[in-house]
Image (tube, helix red, strand yellow):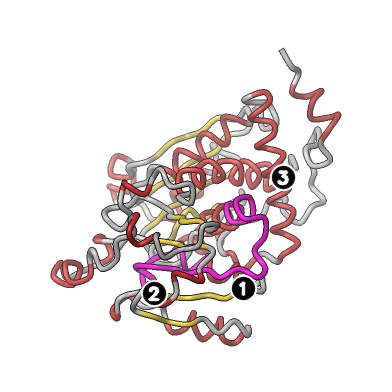
Amino acid sequence: MVNPDRFTRSVSRHLPFGEKRDTRFYGMHIVSVQQFDRQDLDTIFEVAREMRSMVERVGSFDLLKGKVLANLFYESSTRTSSSFAAAVQRLGGSVLQINNVTFSSVSKGEVLQDTIRTMESYADAIVLRHPEEGSAAIAAGVATKPIINAGDGPGEHPTQALLDMFTIIEELGRIDGLTVTMLGDLKYGRTVHSLARLLALYDIKLHFVAPDILHMPAALVDNLKGQGMGPCEHVNLEEVLPDTDVLYVTRVQRERFDDPSMYDLVRGSYVVGPETMAAAKERMIVVHPLPRVDEISMELDDDPRAAYFRQMEYGMYVRMALLALVLGKA
């Protein structure tokens, strides 16, 4: 059996023994993608590649042995919750999994700040998903352990954006010079809000395609324009698909609509399937944060351009990298 400590010591310049407390990432709250610059992304992605190599070689290793991660989810999750749990366990740590706060003291009226202070008594870092925009910042304001934002309502989802960027680089080899098209619910989709902000660090062309009532928030569009990005807004995918290198599809989120009739009005506005993709480049990718409803046909799953399941695996490596970095092990 390979000794993972020996393997780490011999090949990796990122995975030390002991704690690495003199780095920018040590103890960092990850609340927004606006915390990061391109150098930060390069570091995260280089560590993620090392994590991938380690998993492929030895499966798991004890980099975070003795560390405990609290997964605190006020909203449902499959991929984010599971990938963080897998990430910390692949690194030799353990997880406190709270996926349904209905059965916690929140049901008794406990405020978020008290829950955070309680959980950090047991854990070394907290992954938080909450339905209210700004909740991750509130948690970070009282926490002495790293808070990782796993989605704050329609606000941001920084780790999803990081794994999306990593997916693009690993699949297409670069980001600069690409044309990225975001499709679907751009108003409430926190994943596209975060990703658009990260893409602004690169030299890309950006298209937004959405129904009239689900356009990207005007404040975010203005912010991107202020950075010289100038995204183009459309209603029809056909206008931009032939030039697209990355098609980022999102579902229309029923849970964000107060009026069900408005949801019914826009659901199914776009369905990407083999017929749609006939107009797309041969070398491009389709990505999706998942879950999907009906916006991507299952008939597309076997198309090599369909990268959304590979995207999920990339996500575990990115989250392994983030945990190692904020806990001083990379």
Q: Front-most of 271 and 92?
A: 271
Instruction: Answer with the quarter of the image where residue 199 lies.
Output: bottom right
Q: Which residue is mark 3?
A: 47
The three-letter amino acid code for the residue at tag 1 is Ile
Circle 2 packing at 10 Å, graded few (<14), some (14-19), many (20+), is many
Could you tell which of marks 3 and 2 lies nearer the N-terminus? 3
Q: Marks 2 and 3: in contact by CB < 8 Å?
A: no
- x and y percent of residue 65 in the render? 66, 27
Q: Position of residue 141 (x, y in %)?
A: 56, 62
Amino acid of disc 3: Val
State which quadrant residue 215 falls in: bottom left
Whether the magenta-drawn stretch holds residue 105 is answered as no
**Is 200 above or below relative to 140?**
below
Q: Residues within 10 Å of mark 1 (few under 14, many from 20)?
A: some
Which residue is label 1 attached to? Answer: 204
Which residue occupies 32% across, 42% down?
Answer: 100
Label 3 and label 1: CA atoms lie apart by 24 Å
